[in-house]
């Protein structure tokens, strides 16, 4: 079995799944060199199976991967292509491969639920070209089914981070003074981790935190991440006179420290789309709160089980966000311990590299 993977680029966080794919299936990888938003690339020297970098040429929202068409004529039985209709060269590659009788699989977000008109028509045609479709969550599969794409072609591949390394770290975690030593109190912790961007709506988080403090709810807020867009959260915090109870930690890349934070926090809140933050938090036993407008979410929202491992607040509603956060701040130590176990179960059952490998195995010839 020869497997060729052609992706838009190689995000560093996907090294564990790519490495395991190479080990299990002998994959060869070709990656685009850049995208229009900044993404940290993995070190190609760390990935067995890396065969080459393709130059992405952008024309507005569309792009073409130079020298990618020749790969379609190589002696591969299976191709896994990123499911982006905006990548024009992908259309040509899948048509060539199908004419040559090859198995062509796409790995994709699929439908978000907000497509209409031309975009909906284009996506329906695009996904009809593939032999099989690997989709990140069941929500997208249901919408695709409603729009005429055969259920038999689609499998949920979920998503993952550094599963095995994180499970080792998880076994070492315990309650510590990582927060109480900074704040000088033992109040419950609200946590955000990720890029500080306008789309993440952290203004809603600070606003809801301010409401909770006005209501007499004792709690602290920690924000872990780099401000990529000069969002100005520090000014909002200063205006609300919350400086003593908000910790701008800055970026953190030490996985043990991140695990310790999640384990000791009461809740992780991502007011904009949640993405892999939900997988990261649940991996270390922390419940997650995000918004309920799923057509504007990332696939990983589906890892959250309402009232068990997190919750959803009304989209763009700061008061409902405060109410939803408060529920998780009031959990007893016994309830918090049970939440951790349920979160671990969620990750260990589905949102991990080994689950993904078994799904990929099903679609390969």
Image (tube, helix red, strand yellow):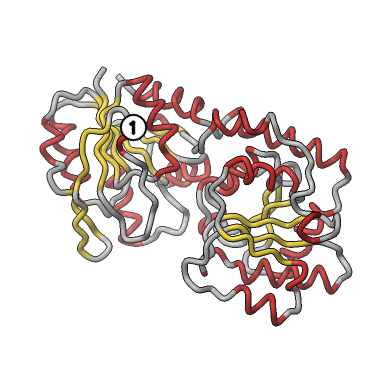
Please give the name of the residue rendered at 73% of the width and 79% of the height, measured from the top-left corner.
Answer: 240
Q: Nearer the viewer, residue 309 or 39?
A: 39
- Number of residues whose C-alpha sits closer than 10 Å to that of mark 1, classed few (under 14), some (14–19) or many (20 or more): some
Q: Which residue is mark 1?
A: 47
Q: Residue at x 47, y 70 (%)?
A: 229
Image location (x, y in percent) of residue 297: 53, 55
Image quarter in which the C terminus is found: top left
Where is residue 52? Give x, y as percent: 20, 38
Q: What residue is shown at x 74% (from left), y 50% (from top)?
A: 178
Rendered position, 5 above or below 215: above
- Left or right of 266, for residue 38: left
Residue 146, position as x, y percentages in the image: 45, 45
The image quarter containing residue 236 is bottom right
Q: Secondary structure at mark 1?
A: loop
* Numbered circles on residues, count: 1
175 above or below 319?
A: above
Image x and y of residue 19, in percent = 39, 29
- The single residue placed furthest to the front in the displayed view is 181
Residue at figure coordinates x 73%, y 69% from the top left: 208
Which image quadrant: the N terminus?
A: top left
Can you tell which quarter of the image residue 44 is in? top left
């Amino acid at each position: 079995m020869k497997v060729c993977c052609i992706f838009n680029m190689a995000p560093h966080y996907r090294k564990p799944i790519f490495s395991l794919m190479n080990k299990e299936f002998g994959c060869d990888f070709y990656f685009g060199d850049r995208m229009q938003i900044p993404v940290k690339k993995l070190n190609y020297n760390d990935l067995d199976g890396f065969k080459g970098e393709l130059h992405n040429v952008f024309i507005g929202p569309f792009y073409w991967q130079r020298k990618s068409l020749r790969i379609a004529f190589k002696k591969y039985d299976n191709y896994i292509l990123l499911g982006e209709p905006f990548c024009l060269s992908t259309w040509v590659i899948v048509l060539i491969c199908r004419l040559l009788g090859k198995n062509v699989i796409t790995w994709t977000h699929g439908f978000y639920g907000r497509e209409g008109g031309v975009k909906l028509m284009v996506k329906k045609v695009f996904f009809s070209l593939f032999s099989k479709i690997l989709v990140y969550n069941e929500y997208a599969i249901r919408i695709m089914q409603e729009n005429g794409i055969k259920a038999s072609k689609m499998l949920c591949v979920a998503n993952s981070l550094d599963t095995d390394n994180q499970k080792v770290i998880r076994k070492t975690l315990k309650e510590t003074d990582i927060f109480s030593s900074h704040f000088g109190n033992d109040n419950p912790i609200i946590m955000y981790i990720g890029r500080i961007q306008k789309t993440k709506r952290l203004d809603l988080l600070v606003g809801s935190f301010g409401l909770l403090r006005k209501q007499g709810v004792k709690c602290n807020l920690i924000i872990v991440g780099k401000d990529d867009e000069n969002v100005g959260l520090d000014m909002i915090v200063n205006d609300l006179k919350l400086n003593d109870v908000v910790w701008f930690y800055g970026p953190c890349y030490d996985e043990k420290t991140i695990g310790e934070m999640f384990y000791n926090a009461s809740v992780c809140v991502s007011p904009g789309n949640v993405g892999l933050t939900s997988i990261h938090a649940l991996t270390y036993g922390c419940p997650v709160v995000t918004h309920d407008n799923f057509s504007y979410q990332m696939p990983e929202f589906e890892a959250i089980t309402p009232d068990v491992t997190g919750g959803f607040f009304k989209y763009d509603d700061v008061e409902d966000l405060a109410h939803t956060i408060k529920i998780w701040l009031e959990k007893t130590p016994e309830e918090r311990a049970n939440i951790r176990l349920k979160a671990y179960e969620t990750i260990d059952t589905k949102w991990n590299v080994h689950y993904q490998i078994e799904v990929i195995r099903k679609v390969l010839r």
